[in-house]
Amino acid sequence: MMRFVKGLVLAAAATAALSSATLAQATNTLDEIVQRGKIVVGISLSTPPYGMTDANLQPAGFDVAIANLIARDLGVELEILDQVSQARIPNLTSNKVDIVISSLGITAERAKAIMYTNAIYVDEQMIIAPTSAAIASLEDLVGKRVGVTRSTTNDTIITDKAIEGTNIQRFEDDAATNQALFSGQVDAIVSGVAAANAINKETDQFQRKFAVRQSPMGIGVRRGDFDLHQWLNTEIMLLWNSGEIQAAQQEWLGIVNEELPRF
Amino acid sequence: MFQQFSLNHVYFMLTGLGWTIGLAAIALIGGSIAGSVLTLMRVSANPVLSRIAQVYIFVVQGTPLLVTLFIAYFGSTYLGFTVAPLTAIAVAFSFYAAAFLGDIWRGAIQSVPVGQREGAHALGLSGADTMRHIIIPQAIRIATPPTVGFFVQLIKNTSLASVVGIVELTRTAQIVSNATFKPLEVYLTAALFYFLVCFPITLFSRRLEKRLSV
């Protein structure tokens, strides 16, 4: 038995060594995209209003709008690969997609695995709860059930900041998280501005209580893909100057950032 | 911004159902072939083959299918080759199903009374003929209910395929539920679709059992 376990550990170590060797290979995704005449973009279509489907069940939303602008300016066709949120980074690192535009919040932890372009939107993560509830700070959440969508920066931030005694409950997607709030399964949820606006359109029984943190979102690029990374940063600057990013923010998110952080 | 849950959405979910049925077919066929091989290895007189099969079953039964699928799809890239989503699914589901079917079918073969084997031997049948004409026909009857139970479970497990980018029934339900914010209605519809696929299989198994027991 021990020998078997040892074998497994060795095999895992060998795979890890091999994988870093493969990843170190220099590729030029930008040239590849132009040559094949198509860009493959990973977007989660179950994260409204970033990625969703319209009345004709075609991809729509803020991330889809940005992807369309990028494909237009690259002069290539756009292929959208629908992905669940846990697959966003693996899809990129294992070459299944060229870039990821999937409400991808920028964190130091993720930046170890992938490169981020400059931000395309800065969201505010906030606590939403029934209008009647007296919740004004993280202290008020102690002993309460707080819902959040798993594998999102909403999850990371509340896990990090919540005071001991807060009962965090994680759901599969935003629809489930919102439904948990509507049906009283949780006392509050952590969500972005756009999701909060969407809830307020449906009902006034729930309201924004307080902001937890600002969350900038960027486009994910494979580590080492510097040409593509630079092209995208140039593109983001141009789209900002032409007002097209602002228009997409207005259309899908209902708010427009005053400026976007550049780094 | 949010849409009403409409017939349009139900049609979209039907395309997801098509994928689910296709994936189930791949899983059942691939799993049955791999499972047969594993069963033969497991009941073989060769101790090395039997031991390999045992370790395989031990490892794969102890790993979640989602992890197997992740390794098959994303892991293969790190080994230097790219696999299509459908290939990854076929491999992962076949490997997974083989580990369970191998054990179910071994159990069925070994629960045929020893007297049957001895009787066949006394009549001068060869090992292969004994297996084919005496043991397997009786083992099938014993194996039917657990095999069908496992198949039904496997069909529902195809919902994991969304992790490799296949928009199957559960994923269409997620997408529709996020566009309409009506999770209850949407998931009940999905449940009904799964039931419509799984129920006939259960019925068929009942009939098969009746026919075999006569």
Image (cartoon, rainbow, N blue to C red):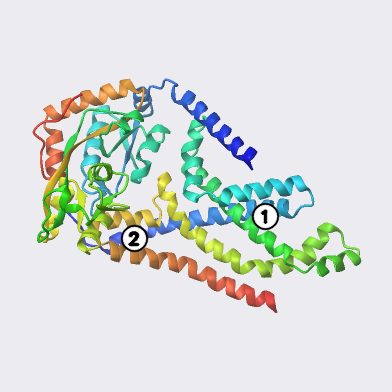
Which of A67 and A203 lies nearest the eye of the viewer? A203
Mark 1 falls on what kind of element?
A: helix
Marker disc for residue B11: 2
Is B169 placed above or below A246 here? below
Of callouts 2 and 1, the N-terminal one: 2
Marker disc for residue B36: 1
Q: What amino acid does circle 2 point to?
A: Tyr
Q: Is residue A70 left or right of residue B124?
A: left
State the separation of the CA atoms marked 2 and 1.
37 Å
Quadrant occupied by the C terminus of chain B: bottom right
Front label number (2 vs 1): 1
Where's residue B163, x and y in %? 41, 46
The residue at 57%/71% (across/down) is B204
Marker disc for residue B62: none
Where's residue A122, x and y in %? 17, 36
- From this viewpoint, which residue is outermost toward the front? A164
Where's residue A11, x and y in %? 57, 33
Tell me where residue B207 sits by quadrant: bottom right
Q: Chain of mark 2?
A: B
Q: Is residue A190 left or right of residue B214?
A: left
Q: Chain of mark 1?
A: B
